Image (cartoon, rainbow, N blue to C red):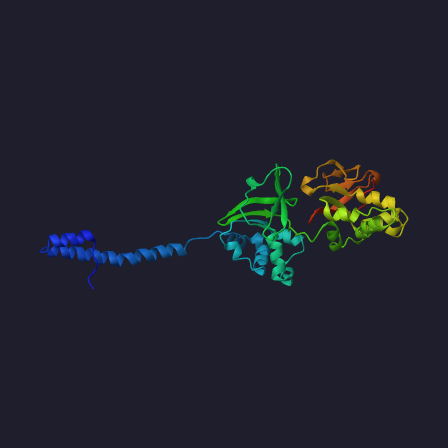
Amino acid sequence: AAHPLPVWCCYTLKQNQTSMKLKNLISRTSLFLLLSAPVVLISCDKDDDNATSNTITDIVVANGDFSTLEAAVVRANLQTTLSGSGPFTVFAPDNAAFSAAGITTSVLNSLSPAQVQSILLYHTLGSRVNAANVPAGPNAKVTTASGDSVFVTRDARGVFVNGVQVTSADISADNGVIHRIGRVLNPPVGNIVETAVASGLDSLVKAVTRATTAAGGDPTLAGTLGSATLTVFAPTNAAFTQLLGALSLTDINQIPIGTLLAVLRYHVVGGRAFSSDLTNGSLPMLAGGSTTVSLTTGATIRGNGNGGNASNITATNIVCRNGVVHLIDRVLLP
């Protein structure tokens, strides 16, 4: 078949039928263009193949400090998702964070992919949020990719999520941003009462149940703890054992109901107070009175009736659906 020529070439040929030299020149030019086109296309394809991606998955894989996170991403089958278009924001626990939480690769492998996915999606937002976009002031509620919520804030110290400080912010990716954190975030397991049950705080649960159901108690106490937005400094089982010993008692049921109610109410603060919200000095309690917080050496809280015996805050920022719980090793006395 005759090779198609540009319009202007056809016009020239019609006007110069006898010019074989020009015709040969045009044919050679057309052949050159036809042979050159595939070369250009091949060159473009080669450039595309060599393009380097920098997705969230790529960054996690390339950073040795995220090797446990990488194992979690693989276990949860999220590597393709986190390589997608996004955008995403990932609060990324480093290896030390997973280690502190007792989460190793073998532990991850003992969990189902769905369980690991739930944890990782709790660390992920379905939008790009750089540090500068995090609001200052009260903790802002943000919905995660798991459908739960985390609470973010920013102050002169940096960015915090659920009271946990971001140690390295704004690690930019093609499909979002990573904020490195030094602690694994745990999705809420329920309200404050349900969290106490799941956390094995048997003595506290027993005390609340008795204070709610016993004659002379407060029948609204358990309901309030399960629905109102609160912060609870929750004594451990050992803390209640220590209290019973100090009172020369052997069972929580032996504590006078009025005393038990007053003590339990003295552990509650209105609203969400993450560890990042605590400051040195007086902390007003919801039912009246105040405690004293000290963050100078460690973190302690002391009730007015505790004398010089402050309680150590042994675990912080246990997020509940209606608040937050901090564990303490001594019962606070009004």
Residue 248: x and y, percent?
91, 48
Instruction: Give the mark count.
Output: 0
Residue at the extreme right: 248
Using the rendered image of the protein, determine whether residue 191 is visible from the camera's viewpoint: yes
- From the viewer's perspective, is residue 334 above or below residue 78? above
Q: Residue furthest left?
A: 18
Q: Residue at x 60, y 61 (%)?
A: 113
Q: Position of residue 323 (x, y in %)?
A: 70, 46
Q: Is residue 328 visible?
A: no
In the rendered image, which quarter contains the N terminus?
bottom left
Answer left or right for 51 relative to 325.
Answer: left
- Front residue of 309/214: it is 214
Q: Is 129 in front, or is 278?
A: 129
Q: Nearer the viewer, residue 259 or 199?
A: 259
The picture places residue 66, in percent across and down from the top left corner, at: 57, 53
The image position of residue 296, as x and y in percent, is 72, 38
Quadrant of the snapshot with the C terminus:
top right
Rendered residue at 25%/58% (across/down): 34
